[in-house]
Amino acid sequence: MDEEVTYGGYLRLKELLAAQKPRTGQHDELLFVILHQTMELWMKQVIHEIGAAQAQIRTGELAPAYKHLARVSRIQAVMTQTWDVLATMTPADYLNFRSMLGTSSGFQSAQFRVLEYRLGLKDAAFLAYHAESSEQRAALEAALGGPSLYDDALAQLAKAGFDIPESVYARAPGAPYEPSAAVEAAWLQVYRDPQKHWAFYQLAEKLIDLDDALLTWRHKHVLTVERIIGRKRGTGGTEGVGYLQQTLTRRAFPEIWSMRTKL
Ligand code: HEM
């Protein structure tokens, strides 16, 4: 007979609640661990939803994809709010255990890079932070080599008759996305006649919701980091706040932003 389903068993609470292993006796370290783990769990769910949205977009089912993308936006809002909890940890609290972290940093989050790659922000340089033949490296390579959410959306635009060169959405595996005048022109057409192109209009707004929310998350991360460590270098080896500020220019769907100026 099958084992009885219990709350704790089903949710693997024994394993989950045993997965916090602070390395010092400092009170705030548990919060630090739990916030990172929570964020990683949400990233897992976001990657899952984006995968489902991509599969639907690829078959031309745009409307069902909106549901997944809307969920992603709501999760992103929760993730951004999480920084306020972290901000209750003062610089003094953090300094009590920071030195123990060595060179570890969110910079090495494999799921965060998978998420960036899946959206369309492809920078192969991040592969180097993950050991070859590790599980994480394989996940990163698959995400880097496969079509992004934006590639799938652009392929649908092309299929619907918009003038988009195949070289834009079917690039060599892993090649970074280069903003294109043809793509900008296609989005302009969509936004100039939303009634006619409603499905793409709605898709574009869902995509910009995601990009906007990711930038908001990044922005709040930088602010919280500055509040906690000022302008110190990061444990991951970057200059810290200066590096994180540069990431605020990353746009996964560049023409959906740039098109707005020309509208
Ligand atoms: C005390 C709290 C935190 C501080 C001081 C901090 C600081 C930093 C710094 C300085 C960087 C730049 C890389 C480096 O040199 O280390 C970074 C990157 C990053 N952090 Fe945090 N962080 C904190 C909490 C978190 C949390 C809770 C997460 C959630 C997973 C997170 C996720 C990331 C990610 C994903 C990056 C890479 C960003 C990118 O390259 O675009 N951080 N963090």
Image (spheres, helix red, strand yellow):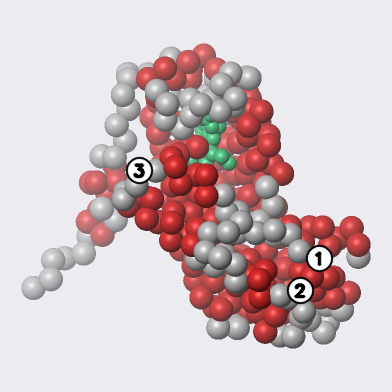
- Badge 3 density bin: few <14, some 14–19, many ≥20, Cα 10 Å: few
SS label for mark 3: loop
Cβ atoms at labels 3 and 1 below 8 Å apart: no
Is residue 2 or residue 35 the one in the foreground? Answer: 35
What's the distance in space between the residues labelled 2 and 1, CA to CA? 18 Å
The residue shown at (66%, 28%) is: 242
Cβ atoms at labels 2 and 1 below 8 Å apart: no
Is residue 37 or residue 232 the one in the foreground? Answer: 232
Is residue 153 or residue 21 the one in the foreground? Answer: 153
Is residue 10 or residue 248 the one in the foreground? Answer: 248
The residue shown at (63%, 34%) is: 244
Amino acid type, mark 2:
Tyr
Residue under circle 2?
201
What's the distance in space between the residues labelled 3 and 2, CA to CA? 41 Å
Against 189, is 81 above or below? above
Asked if residue 27 can be seen in this view, the reply is no
Going from the N terminus, do you reach mark 3 or mark 2 first?
3
Amino acid type, mark 3:
Ala
In the image, which is nearer the foreground, mark 2 or mark 1? 1
The residue shown at (29%, 46%) is: 16
Residue under circle 3?
131
